[in-house]
Image (spheres, helix red, strand yellow):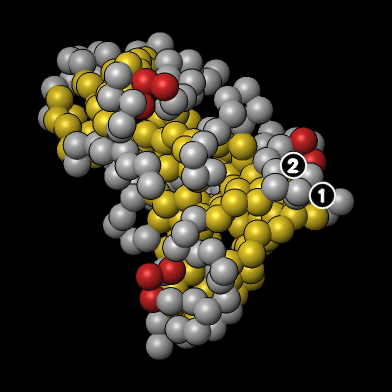
Amino acid sequence: QVQLVESGGGLVKPGGSLRLSCAASGFTFSDYYMSWIRQAPGKGLEWVSYISSSGSTIYYADSVKGRFTISRDNAKNSLYLQMNSLRAEDTAVYYCARGSIAAAGATDYWGQGTLVTVSS
Amino acid sequence: SYVLTQPPSVSVAPGKTARITCGGNNIGSKSVHWYQQKPGQAPVLVIYYDSDRPSGIPERFSGSNSGNTATLTISRVEAGDEADYYCQVWDSSSDRVVFGGGTKLTVL
């Protein structure tokens, strides 16, 4: 069965850095585009970044562009999000999500999320 | 940037029909996807391409999309349908995924 397991979240000071990882299993990881989506406490969903199956195409939300970097290692079935210059408003649960092949633009599986807290 | 507007809340009695709207400029020209999120859980895709259901999603869930409004319809609402619902599109003009603000469905 499809599994996405995020890790790397935690408490970090403003201006600090953090690297999130997402371990994928149960499907051919290299066939799927992937996304990071976040949710601030008590708030709605916010898309963060997208990476194509090969890693050649990448998009970012304006709120994180220039500070966050998405990447993947298809040999390790892993997705990453390098987060630099973190701000209080980056505090959220970060979800790793698989892009749907059947429905372009949709995400059909989500991990359980990892909490990132930016606070001094 | 493209904006999707949802009502913050919708209430419905058990057994009745709930309709959750998602407004956007000419949204009928885009493919709309809907997610259900229960407290403490990750979102689940319930409708894709406006009206298609993933396997395992009950037929009570349906969707439509025309003009400036997309609608998620839940028939014969059950207590277990109580959740937050989000609409989502891909905005090709900006290469961005856009989510609506979410609608809290309360089953009375």
Q: Residue at x 70, y 47 (%)?
A: A57
Q: Amino acid at mark 2?
A: Ser
Q: Residue at x 61, y 57 (%)?
A: A6
Q: Residue at x 36, y 26 (%)?
A: B27
Which corner quadrant of the image does residue A98 belong to?
A: top right
Q: Quadrant of the N terminus of chain A?
A: top right
Residue A76: horizontal and vertical position, in percent? 83, 54
Q: Are marks 2 and 1 in contact (CB under 8 Å)?
A: yes
Which corner quadrant of the image does residue B108 belong to?
A: top left
Query: What residue sits right under mark 1 in the picture?
Result: A74
Residue B45: horizontal and vertical position, in percent? 47, 31
Q: Is residue B19 left or right of residue A54?
A: left
Query: What residue sits right under mark 2 in the picture?
Result: A53
Q: Please tell me how crowded label 1 is: few (under 14), some (14-19), or many (20+) other residues with Cα within 10 Å.
A: some
Q: Amino acid at mark 1?
A: Asn
Badge 2 sits on which subunit?
Answer: A
The local secondary structure at tag 1 comes to: loop
The local secondary structure at tag 2 comes to: loop
